[in-house]
Image (spheres, grey):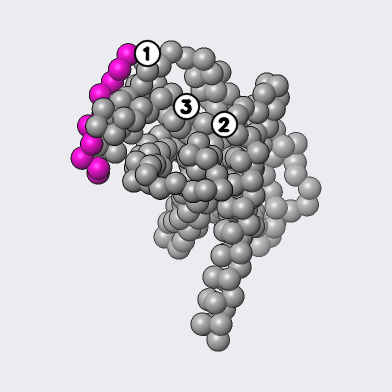
Amino acid sequence: MKPGAIWIPLACYLGVTVVVPLLNGHLGRGASTHLLTVVLTASLLTLLRIAFGRARQRWRR
Amino acid sequence: MTSEALERTDHGPRRPAGVLSTLVWLALVATPAAAVKLRYGNAPVDDYAFILRPTCGLVSLVSGERFAQVSGLGWVCKELELAVVPACAGINYLVVVWLTFGLGLGGKRVGLSRRLCWLPIAALAAFGLTIAVNAVRIGLSVLLRDVSLSIISAEQAHRVLGVSVYLVALWAIYEVAQHLLERPGGVSAAAPEAAVPLPRGVR
């Protein structure tokens, strides 16, 4: 599993949707919902990738 | 300055040319992204036609619902009582996909010429994928508009759906693109002959 596949898109996404508005001085409405969704989606996808990687290793054995 | 002079080496620390190459690449990718963000920060609604027209067209094609442009508002579907406004245009997502393709995939390409060739491909891919993903997001919003959850408001549900679709699609796109570029016979990101020069005396 390549860590870049998770972190590079996430960094770009957070950079555009969170860091840039923060630098401009406003995060906009619903920022907490937005961030919570990002954290939950990222966690879920990471867990899915780990589970998929383990299942594939077992299948190869 | 030639592209060879800007190449990086995997032997030891990066040469100044390699650092310069990275900085030039960062500027080349970040400048259009910043320009788009600035241009569409407070742009009039009709300026979003280049992205909202194909997006709503795609939604219409799949769902059968008709969207009509209303000047000063956006694209409106009267049957669904739904308006696709500039905030739904996906300009931020366009910038995110561009940066992900440019910095993530383009940054792995060795040589300035190869990286420059990657830029128009990344731009076209970012535009096309933004339209496709945004159409999926709007389509799902239309499908799930009558579903109500007691724990979150309709606005929050709309936001959660949008962020989830955007992020899952972004990761899927990046994973597939990385796989396609790195497979044997694909357009390899790091050609061995360019990345690892042979030592002197070795033929």
Q: Is residue B101 visible?
A: no
Q: Quadrant of the image for the C terminus of chain B?
A: bottom right
Question: Of the residues under marks 3 and 1, which one precedes in the sequence?
Answer: 1
In the image, which is nearer the foreground, mark 2 or mark 3?
Answer: 3
Q: According to the image, label 3 marks what residue?
A: B87
In the image, which is nearer the foreground, mark 2 or mark 1?
Answer: 1
Q: Quadrant of residue A43?
A: bottom right
- The residue under the point 40% across, 34% down is B127
Residue span colored magenta:
B62-71
- Image-based side of A56 in relation to B45, left or right: right
Q: Residues within 10 Å of mark 3 (few under 14, many from 20)?
A: few
Q: Which mark is residue B2?
A: none
- Image coordinates of residue A9 in percent, x first then y, are 58, 46
Q: Is residue B176 visible?
A: yes
- The residue under the point 36% across, 27% down is B83
Q: Amino acid at mark 1?
A: Gly
- The residue under the point 64% across, 46% down is A36
How far apart are the two marked residues, 2 and 3, measured between alpha carbons? 23 Å
Q: According to the image, label 1 marks what residue?
A: B72
Badge 1 marks a residue whose secondary structure is: loop
